[in-house]
Image: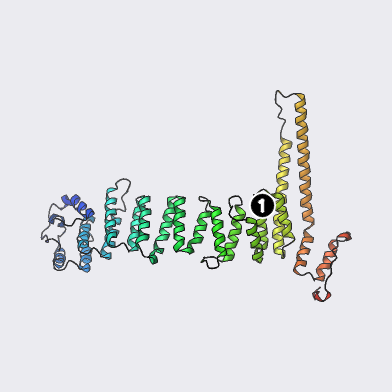
Amino acid sequence: MPPAVATAPDEGASSHHASSSEAVAGGEASVSLDEFNFVTKETDIVYEQELQRDPFQVKVWVGYLNSKKDAPPYTRFLLYERALRGLPGSYKLWFAYLKERVASLSSHDPLEDSRPFEEANVVFERALVHLSRMPKIWMLFVDFLKRQKLLTRTRRAFDRALQSLAVTQHDQVWDRYIQFVKEAGVVETTLRVYRRCLMLLPEKVEDFIAYLQSPEVGRYDDAARLLAEVVNDESSETQRTKHELWLELCDLVCKHPREIKSLRAEAVLRSGISRFSDQVGKLWCALASHFVRLGQLEKTRDVFEEALCGVGTLHDLALVYDAFVQFEESLLAAKMKELEDEENAGPDCAASEDAADRRERKRRRKEKKKQQSEEVDFLMTRLEFLTERRPLLVSSCKLRQNPHNVHEWLARVDLFKGDTAKVPLQKRQPKQHTRDS
């Protein structure tokens, strides 16, 4: 039962602001008559008389609060406290009270004066004693703690929310929880939170993979391993198709060959080549790029040659051929730059160097220059040979598509005019010749 109604305004109302604030923050069981000095209008008396008869009507308390919408915050807070002492389980009153508490501190800086924020935190804790299964109150609380830069308390509040709420309500928590730990910048904590989330929401796995690949995290091996598990699990729920995930996996192992240890990159890429006929050329180029990043140039050439002899469409052939030419041109340009730098380098004779040492140094330098010049010539020969082979490679690709196309065989013979030793002789079935040949 609320205390007796004050029938006249108290002229010293403002002197009791501090004591009122303490009473509100502490949620004391009894409040003095002086603290009810806000009963100043006839409407207030009407509400007070109604509440004397029945203090457990939420509608009356809400109407009373609406009539006091222009009152100072501490006055409204006292009224909320009176209402909640009689109705501690009212979600409507608690939620409105907490929102007003938060709004009243919107212009305050928690670093300058933390006392009113701590008072509000106490009110939140009291509300959660009665309404621990209300997700909106938990989310309002964690957002308020985040604003105060209380990282540990915020993380613990998220954990408490997950422990208190029903499993069916956890999806309302995880997105905010993950966003919070990401912003906090503690990678290990974020990884643990993500792994906990995936136990309940496996569809978040793509977000986790993207996070592992982010530059600030750089867990490429974990990302590749998890991505491989997803593409091999037919029952996994993903936002993208298995085809798209496979291509992402191939791209990942291609770009980070040294970081990824748990998967064999070459096996992954070759598996993709055999699976996806529409991406053959791209995947062959990715495999070659993988060996370039490892510095295995001869292995790169072997991959390109294998691809040129294995692709089945002119589109894929063009992709592989252009990448091969670009690779050889880049090697040639680098070697020519090295030779040019060597030629432009002046003599670096030491003052104490004798004639024999100078002669030996000049000899070694001459041999090095000769070797570099030979390497440049060799690379140029390679590039020219590759360029000359292009018509033949195109012809071979067309014949792989249809080995019984007589018209294409005749065109191929023209490529070997004057060099009969290279004309391929193979048996063909006359009945399988195409009509347009």
Neighbourhood count class around disc 1 (C-alpha, 10 Å): few under 14, some 14–19, many 20 upward: many
Q: How is the image coloured?
A: rainbow
Amino acid type shown at disc 1: Phe
In which quadrant of the rendered image does the C terminus lie? Answer: bottom right
Q: Position of residue 247 (x, y in %)?
A: 60, 61
Instruction: Tell me what residue is drawn at x 42 percent, y 60 percent.
Output: 174
- Residue shown at 34%/50% (left/top)? 148
**Camera-side residue: 314 or 294?**
294
* Rendered residue at 53%/68% (across/down): 235
Residue 402: where, in percent of width, then height?
A: 76, 70
Instruction: Give the vertical position of 236 relative to 118 (above or below).
Output: below
Residue on which disc 1 sits: 291
Judged left or right of residue 248, residue 295 is: right
93 shown above or below 180 = below
The residue positioned farthest toward the front in the image shown: 262
Q: The residue tagged with tag 1: helix, strand or loop?
A: helix
Image position of 286 (left or right of 43) = right
Quarter occupied by residue 159 = bottom left
The structure residue drawn at horizontal position 46% and vertical position 57%, both measured from the top left corner, is: 194
Q: Quadrant of the N terminus?
A: bottom left
How far across and down, in percent of the image, does residue 340 sit? 73, 40
